[in-house]
Image (tube, grey):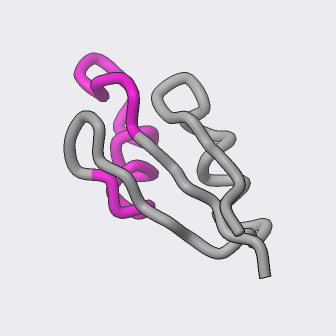
Amino acid sequence: MARLKITQTKSYIGSKQNHRDTLRSLGLKRLNDVVVKDDRPEFRGMANTVRHLVTVEEVD
């Protein structure tokens, strides 16, 4: 199964509370944090919500 490497590249300061909650749900706490999640629609949707704060790469 493919996996997603999600990296927080920008600060959440000044963003909406919903975006902060989404970052926390993904497991990202501070700038340059990296998490690896399964490639599932739930995680893709969460990453899409905060796409201006994170970068997403596919990892095998």
Kindly indicate the quadrant of the structure image that contains residue 1. Answer: bottom right
User: Which residue is at a point 23% across and 22% down the rendered structure image?
Assistant: 13
How far from the left and from the top, in percent, is residue 23? 39, 49
Horizontal relation, residue 52 to residue 4: left or right: left
How far from the left and from the top, in percent, is residue 42? 70, 67
Q: Vertically, is 34 above or below 40?
A: above
How far from the left and from the top, in percent, is residue 56? 62, 43
How far from the left and from the top, in percent, is residue 59? 67, 61
Residue furthest out toward the top: 14
For the residue pair 37 and 21, the one nearer the viewer reads as 37
Kindly indicate the quadrant of the structure image that contains residue 32. Answer: top left
Q: Vertically, is 17 above or below 15?
A: below
Q: Vertically, is 25 above or below 51?
A: below
* Magenta highlight range: 8-28
User: Which residue is at a point 55% across and 23% down the rendered structure image?
Assistant: 52
User: Which residue is at a point 39% across and 38% down the rendered structure image?
Assistant: 8
Quarter of the rendering occupied by the C terminus: bottom right
Horizontal relation, residue 49 to residue 11: left or right: right
Residue furthest out toward the bottom: 1
For the residue pair 24 and 31, the one nearer the viewer reads as 31
User: Which residue is at a point 71% across and 54% down the rendered structure image?
Assistant: 58
Horizontal relation, residue 45 to residue 12: left or right: right
Horizontal relation, residue 21 to residue 13: left or right: right
Kindly indicate the quadrant of the structure image that contains residue 18. Answer: top left
Residue furthest out toward the front: 60
